[in-house]
Image (cartoon, rainbow, N blue to C red):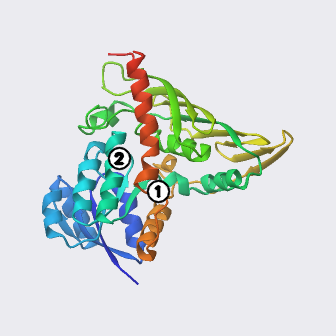
Amino acid sequence: MDIFRAAVIGCGNISSVHFDALKKNNKCVIAAVCDIIKERADKKASEYNAKAFYNIDDMLEWNQFDVLHICTPHYLHFPMAVSAMNKGKHVLCEKPPAIKYHDAVKMSECAAENKVHLGVCFQNRYNAQSVYIKSIIDSWELGDVKAVKGIVTWDRRDNYFNSDDWHGTLDKEGGGVAINQALHTIDLMQWFAGSDIESVKATISRKRFRGKIETEDTADAVFEFKNGVTAMFFGSLCFAENSPVFLEIICEKGKIVMYDELNIYRNGKEKETVTFKKASGEKSYWGSSHKLLIDDFYGALSEGRKFSIDGSEGSKAVKIVNAIYDDAENNNVINGG
């Protein structure tokens, strides 16, 4: 069995789930870690018996790894992924793969040119309730999907944006609630709709953080997909807690509603309630399926098969978010200072 040597760049919050999954995966070893903050890189290197680096160029020159996990701020995803793939490295990138859709497309092209795997971490597709919903949709049991609705209401305060130099900035984060906190939900909406986006009408605003950040803390949109499915989205960072994501899928012969539990309505009469084990811990609203995604990625590498959320698939949500921002800007609907 092939053992892949993994390198992780970016040792902040999200890297913890990558390190944990890699440690438990028998198809890989952690060979290197990289962070511009020397203390963070040294700590992880010591913890996992790996080599520490403080910039990507030195790690790429060292070259003794097979897969790069990118856990850095958004604006670094595209250049780091391209640099690694041009060195023949497989890449597993946190969402979004890039701030701009055209850069996400270039990442896919780079992966194809270099014959390497590119994966994107939309781990909520691996959540048990997401898998169950998708299986019902694909079975045609409820007929065609007609409409999808997604709502994300979470809580962010000043300390969140003051803790680093990239959250809340247009050039480094690329946007606010839509491209960051709600991107997983937008990805699921597209996945369940089963089609590429056709049109978007949207507004974005700063309410809680007016005059404090460059990006939006609230966004709403109406989508139309090429297969005729319509969708509504609302996301905000202005609530009092991180509520569970709400998803509703309207079908010809019933509907599916996901919140704390999953309810399936058939023919307007029958109701099936399915309860899944919930993720626990401070970041439970992320879901708990990073390990499942990472295991599947290494399974794809080992077996020589296509990874399901490759660069092309992982860029679809970015295309929608870019359309949200473009429509909001072109129609002068963003407000706040």
Element type at marker 2?
Answer: helix
Earlier sequence position, callout 2 versus callout 1: 2
Q: Tell me the amino acid under the disc marked 1.
A: Ile
Q: Which residue is mark 2?
A: 104
Q: Is residue 199 above or below residue 308?
A: above
Give the x, y percent position of residue 133.
Answer: 66, 51
- Name the residue at 49% across, 35% down: 154
Kind of element beneath mark 1:
loop
Categorize mark 1 by other alpha carbons within 10 Å: few (<14), some (14-19), many (20+): some
The answer to whether residue 13 is left or right of residue 79 is: right
How many numbered discs? 2
Query: Which residue lies at the image location 17% right of the left edge and 52% below the top edge?
Result: 36
**Quadrant of the drawing holding the C terminus:** top left
Please tell me how crowded label 2 is: few (under 14), some (14-19), or many (20+) other residues with Cα within 10 Å: many
Residue type, label 2? Ala
Picture coordinates of residue 227 (x, y %)?
62, 39
> In x, y percent, where is residue 197?
52, 37
Instruction: Give the residue at mark 1.
Output: 309
Residue contact between numbered discs 2 and 1, judged by CB atoms under 8 Å? no
Q: Residue 53 location in percent, x, y?
A: 16, 62
